[in-house]
Image (cartoon, rainbow, N blue to C red):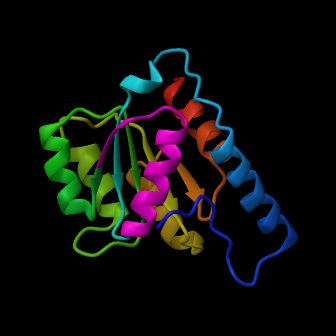
Amino acid sequence: AGSVAILPKPFRHSDLVNALEATLAFVDPDELDLDDYEVDELQVLIVDDSDFSLKHLGRILENIGVHKIIMAHDGNEALEQIEAHEFDLIFTDFNMPNMDGEQLTQHIRTHSSQPYVPILMVTSEQSETRLSGVKRAGVNAICDKPFTPDHMKSLMKNLLSH
């Protein structure tokens, strides 16, 4: 899939504006600028059971200068990657089979060799009750789907500037 923006149906005017901004950001990207990291050296893990979402987020990251990306389809695969590699940032979906994003976050925070790695949850989950559990588990930030590349860059800059 070669999409650069996701437009939900039915969409609002603001959704169309976001999709157009995402398209412009893809055509004329601004590389992510970080004070403490070389963007092209960032090690990033993306965890999502949707191949479409993995490719979409991967494309956005590559477009802003992040090229060291590893992908996993669920929390179990992610844990294997976390044991094999050091990461600067982890993106995870919430709802996944085998091990969801909340369980993955809990495991990273309590049982992994990387308990302090920033975790950004990218999700369409709307239940505040479920999202509060994710926050208690240790997620550093939550990003709603769909999102714009500029919003993603802003979240990344905030997470990696501490």
Q: Relative to residue 63, is residue 26 drawn left or right?
A: right
Q: Nearer the viewer, residue 107 or 150?
A: 150
Residue 55 sits in which quadrant?
bottom left
Residue at position x 68%, y 39% in the image: 28
Q: Is residue 52 magenta?
A: yes
Q: Residue furthest right?
A: 13
Left or right of residue 118: residue 85: left
Q: Residue at x 29, y 62 (%)?
A: 103
What main secondary structure does the magenta stretch of the protein show?
A: helix
> Is residue 86 shown above or below 90?
above
Q: Relative to residue 55, is residue 47 drawn left or right?
A: left
Inspect the magenta stretch and tell me whether residue 118 lies in it: no
Q: Residue furthest top?
A: 35
Q: Quadrant of residue 18?
A: bottom right
The residue lying at 60 percent from left, 38 percent from top is: 153
The picture places residue 149, in percent across and down from the top left corner, at 63, 47
44 with respect to 98 (left or right):
right
Residue span colored magenta = 51-70
Which is more toward the observer, 98 or 17? 17
